[in-house]
Image (cartoon, helix red, strand yellow):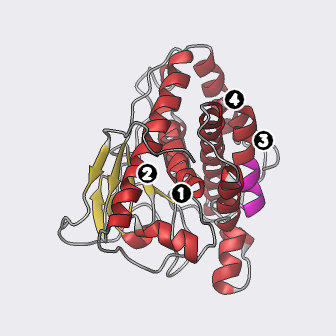
């Protein structure tokens, strides 16, 4: 990815080296199991639901159509104020992580610069897309931390991996995650790293257009099986939004040979089935909450090929 010399985002909060006080487990969900690394994950969901969506599927269709007609979709949700968020629900990625943070190095500083540029590119793309649709994009803050951090979703450790907290509209990343992504999950490359940021920002976009608030409201009425399948749909949409961002980054001439393959490989390596097979030697489909490798790769590619948010309606899709 051609990133050097480009604008850096001003929305970086570098908390590395700071003490965050006492430590408690991040609220909003356990992973796939003990000692699991996480990336962007939604809530506490666990099992499987019938495909086809139901009420929320129609809601998301309305949200997307309203957005691209220039109508603020939040206006359609309870008088324009949106649906209430549960600030304790963090959206993290599970990937079986076991390690903690690391001391800042010169390499970390270079990575900070890279992350700042990637975040700036997400700002440029989503500001343009929201403006084209007649809306206004609220840029998120990206927090760099080491070891542990406190957010509106509670305390989290480096073992949580990157996560998005809707309560404070912030993305959180411990840079040691990327070393593990490269070594343990065999997903090297700068565009693989950019994909992780773009996915988390995809959750922020979902938050702005009302998807995450509605999911948090509805999941309290769902069984674990239903909530798990809905979680998969939310995660795959964030993958698709990451692909939409990739489409526009490619149009800006920033991609190099092999970048798309790096992102697709990362999506493959962090699929629920791939993670479980790597960590425990067998797969438990009913515990999936992010989507299989094939699903994650396919939905990222759908966004990347189309550049269109409307192509990312995972909620009304009969098959994922």
Q: Secondary structure at mark 2?
A: helix
Q: Which residue is mark 3?
A: 317
Position in image of residue 202 (x %, y %)? 54, 43
Question: Tags 2 and 1 in contact by the CB under 8 Å rule?
Answer: yes
Q: Which residue is mark 4?
A: 310
| Frontmost residue, 238 versus 258 | 258
The residue lying at 22 percent from left, 66 percent from top is 17
When the figure is inspected, residue 106 is found, relative to residue 199, above or below; the finding is below
Q: Is residue 49 left or right of residue 41?
A: right
Q: Is residue 166 left or right of residue 210?
A: left
Question: Tags 3 and 1 in contact by the CB under 8 Å rule?
Answer: no
| Residue 248 magenta | no
Q: Which residue is mark 1?
A: 193
Question: Which residues lie in the magenta part?
Answer: 292-299
Q: Secondary structure at mark 1?
A: helix
When the figure is inspected, residue 14 is found, relative to residue 127, above or below; the finding is below
Q: Nearer the viewer, mark 3 or mark 1?
A: 1
**How far is the residue under mark 4 from the one under mark 3?**
12 Å
Whichever of labels 4 and 3 marks the residue nearer the N terminus, that label is: 4
Q: Residue furthest front?
A: 5
Position in image of residue 148 (x %, y %)? 30, 68
Position in image of residue 118 (x %, y %)? 47, 44
Q: Which residue is mark 2?
A: 114
Label 1 Cα neighbours within 10 Å, binned few <14 / some 14-19 / many ≥20: many
Image quarter for residue 172? bottom left
When the figure is inspected, residue 144 is found, relative to residue 52, above or below; the finding is below
| Frontmost residue, 181 versus 316 | 181
Q: Which mark is residue 179?
A: none
Question: Tags 4 and 3 in contact by the CB under 8 Å rule?
Answer: no
**How far is the residue under mark 2 from the one under mark 1?**
9 Å
Q: Secondary structure at mark 4?
A: helix
Q: Residue furthest right?
A: 319
């Amino acid at each position: 990815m051609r990133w050097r010399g480009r604008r850096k985002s001003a929305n970086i909060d570098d908390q590395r080296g700071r003490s965050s006080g006492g430590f408690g487990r991040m609220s909003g969900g356990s992973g796939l199991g003990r000692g699991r690394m996480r990336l962007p994950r939604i809530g506490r969901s666990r099992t499987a639901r019938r495909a086809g969506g139901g009420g929320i599927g129609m809601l998301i269709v309305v949200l997307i159509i309203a957005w691209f007609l220039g109508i603020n979709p939040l206006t359609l949700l309870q008088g324009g104020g949106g649906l209430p968020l549960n600030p304790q629900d963090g959206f993290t990625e599970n990937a079986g992580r076991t390690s903690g943070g690391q001391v800042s190095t010169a390499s970390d500083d270079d990575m900070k610069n890279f992350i700042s540029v990637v975040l700036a590119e997400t700002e440029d793309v989503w500001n343009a897309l929201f403006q084209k649709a007649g809306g206004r994009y609220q840029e998120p803050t990206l927090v760099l931390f080491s070891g542990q951090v406190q957010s509106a979703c509670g305390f989290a450790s480096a073992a949580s991996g990157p996560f998005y907290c809707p309560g404070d509209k912030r993305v959180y990343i411990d840079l040691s995650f990327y070393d593990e992504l490269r070594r343990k999950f065999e997903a090297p490359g700068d565009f693989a790293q950019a994909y992780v940021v773009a996915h988390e920002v995809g959750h922020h976009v979902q938050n702005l257009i009302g998807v995450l608030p509605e999911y948090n409201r509805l999941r309290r009425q769902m069984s674990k099986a239903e909530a798990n399948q809905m979680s998969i749909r939310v995660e795959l949409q964030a993958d698709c939004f990451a692909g939409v961002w990739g489409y526009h980054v490619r149009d800006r001439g920033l991609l190099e040979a092999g970048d798309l393959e790096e992102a697709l490989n990362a999506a493959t390596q962090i699929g629920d089935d791939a993670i479980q097979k790597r960590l425990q030697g067998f797969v438990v489909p009913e515990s999936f909450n992010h989507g299989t490798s094939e699903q994650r790769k396919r939905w990222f590619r759908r966004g990347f090929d189309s550049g269109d948010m409307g192509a990312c309606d995972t909620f009304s899709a009969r098959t994922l």
